[in-house]
Amino acid sequence: MYRPYLSSLADSRSFLDVESQLRSLTQDYVTSFNTGNYDQVATMFVPDGVLMAPSREAANGRKCVERLLRDLGEEGYSDMRVETIRVENSGDMAMEVGRYSVTIRQANGTLIPERGKYVKVWRRLGAWLILADCWSRNPPVTQ
């Protein structure tokens, strides 16, 4: 007799390779940020995970991560886009390197583009969760 299949079809990530899983999770991160679901992004971190944004104190723990992301959203950060360039993994640890772009809406309505690079460190604790997320801006493009 076969045991019942307990997994839902909606989450087929367990069948994907690590790189595909992390690319998919990163897109979930971006979608959640862009729709203002900062609490959803924070749940992608381990309980004591850290988010390090440029010119900011590190946000340690899910509540602080959520607060930092909310502050960024309220400061006009929007339309985040990412491109994963590289994923390396060994066992239950992985590193993701990529590029990002975001638009920052100023109080007067001016839109300022920002581009940069990021590194995420992931740990598989049943599901893949973020241990650390760090990004830095590229120098502004002068014309």
Image (spheres, rainbow, N blue to C red):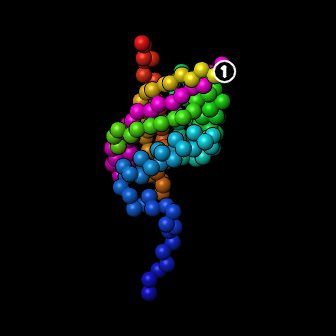
Q: Which residue sits at x=42%, y=17%?
A: 141
**Which of the 4 quarters of the picture holds residue 13?**
bottom left
Asked whether the viewer can see residue 54, the reply is: yes
Q: Which residue sits at x=42%, y=13%?
A: 142
Q: Residues within 10 Å of mark 1 (few under 14, many from 20)?
A: few
Q: Which of the pair 4/132 is nearer the observer? A: 4
Give left or right: position of 99 versus 63: left
- Find residue 49 and report its horizontal and vertical position in percent: 53, 40
Is 129 situated above or below 85? below
Question: What secondary structure prevails in the magenta region?
Answer: strand
Marker count (numbered): 1
Residue named by callout 1: 107
Asked whether the viewer can see residue 72, the reply is: no
Magenta stretch holds residue 56: no
Q: Which residue sits at x=41%, y=30%?
A: 117
Q: Amino acid at mark 1?
A: Ala
- Find residue 30 and report its horizontal and vertical position in percent: 52, 41
Q: Tell me the magenta residue range.
A: 88-108
Q: Which residue sits at x=44%, y=32%?
A: 100
Is 58 situated above or below 36? above
Magenta stretch holds residue 91: yes
Is the N terminus in the top left, top right, bottom left or bottom right quadrant?
bottom left
Secondary structure state at the residue bearing disc 1: loop
Is the C terminus in the top left, top right, bottom left or bottom right quadrant?
top left
Residue closest to the far top: 143
- Find residue 94 and report its horizontal and vertical position in percent: 38, 45
- Find residue 17 and report its horizontal and vertical position in percent: 35, 55
Residue closest to the far bottom: 1
